[in-house]
Image: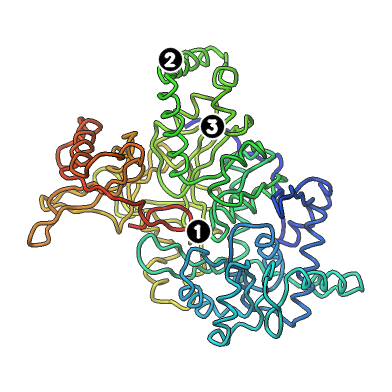
Amino acid sequence: MKNYPLYEEGVTYSKDFRDLIEIQASRYPSRAAFRFMEDGKDVTVTRLEFKKAVDSLGTAICSLGIHREHLAVLGDNCYQWLLCYFTILASDNVVVPVDKELKFDEIMNVLRHSDSSVVFFTDKYEEEFHRHADELENIKYFICFRPQMECTGRFLDFRAFCADGQARLEAGDTQYLEIPQVNDELGDIVYTSGTTGIAKGVMLTRQALLSNVVQAARITKLYTTCLSVLPYNHTYEASCGILASYNYGCTICINENLRTVADNLKKYKPDYIMLVPLFAENFYKKIWKTLEKQGKDKTVTRAIKMSNNLRKIGIDMRPRLFKQIHEVFGGNLKKIICGGAPIRPEIAEFFDGIGILLVNGYGITECGPLIAVNRDLSNKYESVGVVLPCGEAKIVDPDQNGEGEIAYRGDNVMLGYYKNPEATAEVMKDGWFLTGDYGKYEDGFLYITGRKKNLIVLKNGKNVYPEEIEGYVQSIMELEEVVVRSIKDQNGDEIGLLAEIYPSPSFSEGKTKEELEKYFLKACDEVMKDVTSYKKIQKVVIRDTEFPKTTSRKIKR
């Protein structure tokens, strides 16, 4: 492992979230904190303007007598969502980010279970909240960002609410500014996205989030402008993407929805972006399909090989050689930070080959979420990097290959699951959090093998991690998504492997399912020709639609 100092330039150490906001406003008052589109206009909010907005909203909340209570935030990614998030973290209340993809009855369950007394939300949910307000007796106030209906009683207009807070602040109301913060107390309840099992309320302290904020920027370099794509209720985006970027002094450009990612890359020209591997995989495949269609794939392959040889003698031609590909990402992208799942090494190798560094990391909601990430100058594509300086990891009961369950302890570990001591006891052992992920350590780098719950134990006693097999199958260019599961005999024993595939719609057009199954089974054989026999795919099933996914674009197994 190439050892070099952690990054310190640009990293701000704050005693609490109020301090974080004040430091940024005093150091860089006119620097853009956020950019976003609203009512067809490109809006910029400076750091000083953002601090004033936080103080106004916080003062308005205090005027309602809301202290040490749970405040939920629900809706699509938007500036108002982030304003609420920062404001609540810089107070004595607890923020509850709610997954916008949940069905409304599930949203109500989260609001009840979390004991939320206030909910901030986008107008998408306005009608439903009016209809079901009587069923949510625990909610004192429903505050809509841009209401389309009349606001009376428990319903408030967010804009008028903030304006009232600003007026109180200007009149000398300082109660929000004087709220003491205790970092080791509960600050955030995040309900897990639930790729497997039932969602649980993860209790994170403010210190857990602050540790992630600082350590993320110390271990992997951030730049000046990022495009924020992933959902804000997910800790990866909220903690690493938003809080760490804000603390570093970056401008955060808010992407409206998945359809606008390509346009916003060109519009905002970010120099880094945080994604889940599915996004990087899609970018990779679309680039190669376009190159093949244009007859340029072999030319680019040769150019990457030539460029890599030149780099060995200190000559870097990548910005010039691959300018057209860079323009797809806005022309300024230096780095992609991936998290949420392992990524195929050839994807990271390709992006590096064209001049965009791709580093993969590893985290879990219960750790706020970051545990490990690759370093810029010591990037091993197959691994998820080195463990954060604020914590440590170990492998529990490793087998002969050094593989076992990953356990972690550090400043960023949760307090437990909200109102669920039994589930907490299952994963917290002597101060260590059991992640439920299998992996191994090699030369200081952490490698993820697979998810404990997904492990397939074949009748012959062999263990198979479906994620490993999916990595091979995913390299087939004609497919979009795949999930590997077991084939069971009449006794329920797992006797082989099956790949459920969602093909590229353009490829599957005009073909029968039988033709597609035959094609992909042969393709699986080709990409896995050197893999041991018990890991080979024996059957293929074709899907007509995409797999259902969590808000963070991870497939629900």
Q: Which one is closest to the eye, mark 2 or mark 1?
A: 2
Quadrant in the rendering for residue 126? bottom right
Question: Which circle, 1 or 3, is nearer the viewer?
Answer: 3
Which residue: 56% across, 31% down?
Answer: 328
Task: Tell me which residue sits at (81%, 47%) in the image.
Answer: 28
The amino acid marked with disc number 3 is Leu
Give whichever of discs 3 and 2 has the lower sequence position.
2
Circles 1 and 3 in contact, beta carbons < 8 Å: no
Circle nearer the viewer, 3 or 2: 2
Above or below 117: residue 508: above
Q: Amino acid at mark 1?
A: Cys
Q: Which residue is mark 3?
A: 357
- Looking at the image, is mark 2 or mark 1 earlier in the sequence? 2
Q: Secondary structure at mark 3?
A: strand
Residue 246 in picture, x, y percent from top left: 69, 50
On the image, the x and y values in percent for residue 68 come to 66, 78
Query: Which residue carries the number 2 mark?
Result: 302
| Residue lying farthest to the left in this orientation | 490
